[in-house]
Image (cartoon, rainbow, N blue to C red):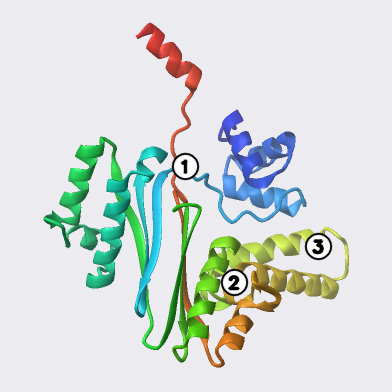
Amino acid sequence: MASVTAADVKRLREISGAGMMDCKKALVATDGDMDAAVDFLRKKGLAAAAKKSGRVAAEGVVLARKEGRAGVVVEVNAETDFVSKNEQFTGFVERLSGVILRLRPADVPELLKLPLDDGTVEEELARLIATIGENMTVRRFALLEVESGAIGAYVHGGGRIGALVALSGSPSEALEEVAHQVAMHIAAANPLCLSRSAMDPALVERERSVLRERAEASGKPAHIIEKIVEGQMRRFYAESCLIEQSFVMDGDLTVAEAVERASPGAQVTAMARFQLGEGIERKEEDFAAEVAAQLHG
């Protein structure tokens, strides 16, 4: 059986909001598996659904921008928040986004080989690292295009969150406006996916399993349990799928309805949302140990 550390318990408490002893019991019961421990707590009604089980811990900037019928969101990481405000760094990210929009690379390795300034992206990044003195990485990007429609791009929190959306439909000012509003919605509401069909089947089954086990604990008849589960699944989809979410600009409409109202026949076709450092874990430093090491070094 895997040993359960205080750090594990602390992390599970941050993810789930459950009490310390409940978190410890959940970790022991699941042999230290963090995701399974979250499910264990949820089945007992002790924790809410967690979209992410990793803590966010990276610096840098996320940039989202559009140009004509295309848009890009890109994340470039650095070691400290100080660098994210450096004009050389932000200028590099801006020029990098332009390269992506013009040359349409398939992935980051291809992007690094493309021309930028007096060399390649990779060479310019190396020069920037040498100048500023911090390690930096081009982590990821997403490029969206439409043949006929509109692109919406939005950056929140000074580059902490970037959102991008593609809408199909007849080009118009109304479509451009609602595209921008939907991009803002994506940044705020953090949908898991565009629609039910785009959701990971394993995630759907996991959610259904948790809800069914919780409903069965009520002791109600099977046909009632099934109705309860289906009702809760509809709520899950409404909270998780972009086009089914309540529109932040008008809570009486879903996102799909708001787009249709702004431009009849228009639809949301793609989305992307990057949060700075999402999914990256950085080692937690023991400050006391660091000071002690310096004193005795």
Q: How many angstroms separate mark 3 from mark 1 (CA)?
A: 38 Å
Q: Alpha-carbon neighbours of circle 1 within 10 Å: few (<14), some, or many (≥20)?
A: some
- Amino acid type at mark 2: Cys
Q: Secondary structure at mark 1?
A: loop
Q: Nearer the viewer, mark 3 or mark 1?
A: 1
Q: How many angstroms separate mark 2 from mark 1 (CA)?
A: 26 Å
Give the x, y percent position of residue 213.
75, 60
Q: Residue at x 61, y 29 (%)?
A: 6
Give the x, y percent position of residue 12.
62, 41
Write down the quadrant of residue 181 in the picture.
Answer: bottom right
Q: Residue at x 66, y 56 (%)?
A: 49
- Amino acid type at mark 1: Ala
Q: Does 54 sit left or right of 250 as displayed?
A: left
Viewer-proximal residue among 97 and 91? 91
Q: Residue at x 26, y 59 (%)?
A: 95
Q: Secondary structure at mark 2?
A: loop
Residue 241 got which mark? 2
Q: Does 215 sit left or right of 250 as displayed?
A: right
First of labels 2, 3 by sequence position: 3
Residue 216 got which mark? 3
**Quadrant, the N terminus:** top right
Q: Alpha-carbon neighbours of circle 2 within 10 Å: few (<14), some, or many (≥20)?
A: many
Residue 113 got which mark? none
Q: Residue at x 67, y 72 (%)?
A: 238
First of labels 2, 1 by sequence position: 1
42 up-or-down from 250: above or below: above
Q: How many angstroms separate mark 2 from mark 3 (CA)?
A: 26 Å
- Say which residue label 1 marks: 57
Write down the quadrant of residue 32 in the picture.
Answer: top right
- Amino acid type at mark 3: Glu
First of labels 3, 1 by sequence position: 1
